[in-house]
Structures are given as C-alpha cells and as structure tokens.
Image (cartoon, helix red, strand yellow):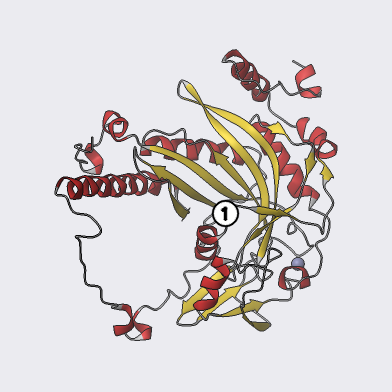
Amino acid sequence: MYDFLFKPFSEMTDEDYARVGFKSGLEIHQQLLTQKKLFCRCPAGRYSDQYNAEILRAMRPTLSELGEYDGTALMEFKTKKEIVYRINYETVCTYEMDDTPPFELNEEALDIALEIAMTYGCAMVDEIHIARKQYLDGSIPTGFQRTTIAGVDGAIPYKDRMVDIIQLGLEEDACREISDVGHRRVYITDRLGMPLIETVTGPDMRTPTEVAEVGDICRRIVRSTGKVRTGIGAARQDVNVSVTGGTRIEIKGTPRIPDIPLLTYNEAMRQWNLLRLREELKTRGITAETFSARTEIVTTAAPQDAFPSRPGSDREGDDRGLRRARGLQGSVALADADRHPLRAGDFGSRARHRLPHRTAEHHQFRQSRGDAAPAPSGPHCARR
Ligand SMILES: [Zn+2]
C-alpha cells in the first residue's frame, strides 16, 4: 500500500495528501495581554536582558509518591546540566523562583481565557481546577507548570465543516533560554509565569495548507478580542502530524504560521518514506536478526565550542525550553493543592456580555448538524 511516491512540495495536490492519509491538529500557545503574571503580581511582558543576580541550581531526581524515580527526571539528571537563572528584581519574585505558594489566579487572565473559550463555542467548565504539569529541563525553576482548563468541546467553522476545539487551557509561560553550552544552560526569568492560553484542535486538517489556514483562523479569533499579545514569540504552535500507518509526531514551537505547510509536508513525507523502507525490508526478508550495523559516536570527536548557541537570538521569540520540556513531560497533570478551585460562572457571566453574536449562530450550526453541546444561555443569547 506504500507505493505512492511523494512529489516536490509545490506539486502535491489535495488528492495526494488523501492518498497518504495526512492528518494534523494544532496546539496553539498564545500569551494574554495582562498587566501581571498568572499566579503572582510581577509585571507581565517586560522583557530585558539586564539582571541583578544569578541563581545556580543543580537538578537531582527524587522518589515520587509511588516510590519510583521518574524516567524523564533521571534522563535530565544524567545530562549533568548546571542550570543558571538570571533574575531581575523588577520582573520576578519568590513565587516563580522558589516554592512560595501561588497568589489567587489572575482574574484578568481568567476573564480573557473564558471569553476566548466562549468565542470558540466551548462548553464551559463549572469550576476552575489548578493542576501541575511536570517540567524537568529547568525552564521552570519549581519543576512544574500550573495549568487549568477553561473550556472544552468547542468548534470553529472551516470550509464546509467544523474543526473541533478539544480544549482551551490557561497556563504559565516558561523561562527564556539564553544559552545552552556544554553542561551549562542559562535562562532569564522575565517571561516565566506570564499567562498564556493553549488551544487544542482536533486532528481535523487534511492538507498542510489546511493546517496553516486553521492556525490563522484561530489566531484571528483570539486577536479579535484585543486582549492577547502580538509580535514575535507571543504565539507559538505545536503541530501534530501523522499519515496512514505512521505515528503522531509533534513539531514543537513553530512561531510562524507560514512555516507550517512545508514543515508538515516534510514530516508526512519522512513518515511515509520510513514506512516504504519497512515494506522494502519486509519484501527482502530482512529482520532484526539478519541485520547488522556498525555505530560510531561522532559528537565527542568535535570540540565543545563547535556548536555555539546563537547569542542575542533568545528574545521572547525563543521557545527551546518550552519545546524541549513539552517533548519530555508526561501527559498527566496532577491536581495542585495550593489553590482551591474557582467557580467559573462568577467570571463567565461577565465575559459573556462582551461576546459577539457569532457564538449563538455557531451553536445553531452545531445543533443543526447534531452536536450534543447545549446552546449557551445568558443575556447575550436572550437578546437574540
Ligand atoms: Zn512573581
């Protein structure tokens, strides 16, 4: 079945992508335009490479509640990295840098997240529960990111169909990475803890162009609120790609939507050609037992400064820490005992007043195609 040969990017047609079973979904991270960070009262969006102090931290794995070592933590430990945090007293406090308990969730950020969730036609959650996601590469000093879900099961109209919005989360941003040379990785902490939303779409896109178009629609929808940050690094996309018979692969932290078509094409082609190779090996009767290979480690042969990191390229646009962390982190988020859940309705009714009329039409559309999600209630709908 893997007889299809990929053509050059510019010659691929929608039918070609259908033949290989191209499938893609997006996770879009978008910073919110708030005065302050999400769980403390430090200012948000004040970037500077100036710092007043450095903190050196060595990571070491500890036993979990289950009496086991986390595999990812062990892996990070084995890299023997020294983590250096550059801190500026104007943009960071003991909440981000240490284990000071969180302040109340930033209401301004929650307000915006709920508004955007409603704009996507999401079913709203009754309570906002704060959870922790592990981050073990050092890009978050505490080792975890606080995160919460604001809405689920939304959808946006696209072409003749709807693209699902699986969930909309509200979470903290990670540190900016300054350099990563040898055993020393340097972060600056100004971006740490800034509120961002994560929009997760269904795997509903069938061609690379569709992925970029849906990404652009989502970008415009959130920007229409006027309450999100713009500019390089304010929005970053993770793109999931698979083909028939392949595995879902996540391309991390693409800051530019126009890059998405070629990236997804390349990943689909890579998977497809691996599958073709596997078929060829099978037809030639080559198995793990009959195959031998010689390996040599070449990285140790090069001098340590042969791969310098790019100085000055790590403004807010750089996302390597977040990308790496997301690649490593487990999918499980643990409930955070430091903060009680909040009643979402208290905030939601306020945001609902500001919604455009589109949402009600949107729900009618969804109901007309048999979706179970109930129409939103509230003053905005009563008005119609
Ligand atoms: Zn702070």
The N terminus lies in quadrant: top left
Residue displayed at 59% across by 42% down: 199
Assign a secondary structure to mark 1: loop
Dividing the picture into quadrants, the one containing residue 177 is bottom right
On the image, the x and y values in percent for residue 271 come to 31, 47
On the image, the x and y values in percent for residue 119 come to 66, 32
Query: Which residue is the extreme one toward the front?
Result: 289
Q: Residues within 10 Å of mark 1 (few under 14, many from 20)?
A: some
Q: Which residue is mark 1?
A: 234
On the image, the x and y values in percent for residue 353 come to 78, 30
Q: Is residue 328 visible?
A: yes
Find out if the beta carbon at label 1 lies less than 8 Å from the nearest ligand 1 atom: no
Determine whether, in the image, residue 210 is placed left or right of residue 296: right
On the image, the x and y values in percent for residue 233 come to 53, 57
Residue displayed at 66% across by 73% down: 62
Q: Out of 384 and 253, give the one closest to the viewer.
A: 253
Query: Which residue is the extreme one toward the left?
Result: 284
Determine whether, in the image, residue 77 is placed left or right of residue 251: right
Quadrant for ligand 1 reads bottom right
Residue displayed at 28% across by 46% down: 269
For badge 1, the amino acid type reads: Ala
Q: Out of 267 and 216, give the one closest to the viewer.
A: 267
Position of 71 relative to 374 (above/below): below
The C terminus lies in quadrant: top right
Q: Is residue 318 visible?
A: no
Query: What count of labels does the image hold?
Result: 1
Query: Which residue is the extreme one toward the bottom?
Result: 303
Dividing the picture into quadrants, the one containing residue 51 is bottom right
Q: Out of 189 and 184, give the one closest to the viewer.
A: 184
Determine whether, in the image, residue 224 is placed left or right of residue 348: left
